[in-house]
Image (cartoon, helix red, strand yellow):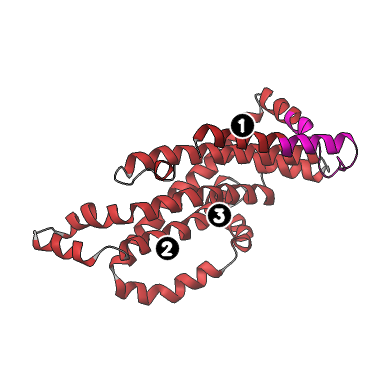
Amino acid sequence: MRTGTERLIQAALVVVVFGGWQAGVATRVIDPFFFPAPWDIVGQMYEWLSDTGFYKHVSVTLTETALGYVIGTVLGVVGGVWLGLNRTAARILDPFIKSFNAIPRVVLAPIFVLWLGLGLWSKVALAVTLVFFITFFNAMQGVREVNPTVLANARILGASRRDLLHHVYFPAAASWILSSLRTSVGFAVVGAIIGEYLGASAGLGYLIAQAEGNFHAVGVFAGIVILAMFVLVIDRILDVAENRLITWRPDAQSANR
């Protein structure tokens, strides 16, 4: 199926779903108190986007998300690669890592608030815990999936440990790490939003919590749509980065045509 046809089908699905939703609200088949009309949601989004004060909330959430994402990714990659190469340390730390990973992240949110206060870093800490384990396990598995024959040949050619990391381990784990980066974007946003729900004076989560407290469903849905668009933009950036970093991988879209 060609790309143009796929785009037409996507556009048709959008028209059918949102057009049906709008018609359902107009005919009172759908209760607008619980499911406000899409046009009303668009109007709320326009109102927010027209207000310069709204961008303060966006910048707060963006900062929390970016810091949590970057810190969690760096720690996850470093930790995953280290334990992927050091099997003894991995066996020693395995029960502790699994125990911490089993803790629901929402439970940690109030603890971070107690430790770090209601400011920026409690939200960042929560986002880090959500991002870390996704990247960590993927990086560790990616390193362990390296072909032993490739490693043996590199060692025969005189590759040092640093050379192996740069030319063998990291390229082999790159697809694993990049796939985890795509997944962890949403979790970084979730961490920031949950933290803002618990207590904040700014941020998209704060706006959604305010709308929810006032039973303003339009504001809640508008905030959700903006967050979804926010994640889609980041996902597109990761698409570009992935295509540049993994140039040897065949184009999946071309292969499926």
Amino acid tagged 1: Lys
Q: Does the magenta stretch include residue 27?
A: yes
The quarter of the displayed image where residue 106 is located: bottom right
- Provide the residue designation for mark 2: 137
- Provide the residue designation for mark 1: 56
Q: Residue at x 80, y 41 (%)?
A: 217
The quarter of the displayed image where residue 240 is located: top left
Residue 105 in sight from this viewpoint: yes
Q: Earlier in the sequence, mark 1 or mark 3?
A: 1
Residue 201 in sight from this viewpoint: no
Residue 126 tag number = 3
State which region is magenta: 16-42
Disc 2 on helix, strand or loop? helix
Amino acid tagged 2: Phe
Gap between marks 2 and 3, in whole Å? 18 Å
Q: Does the magenta stretch include residue 58?
A: no
Q: Residue at x 73, y 45 (%)?
A: 209
Q: Where's residue 215, x and y in %?
A: 83, 43
Q: Quadrant of the C terminus?
A: top left
Q: Residue at x 67, y 38 (%)?
A: 13
Task: Indicate left or right for 107 with 252 as reference.
Answer: right
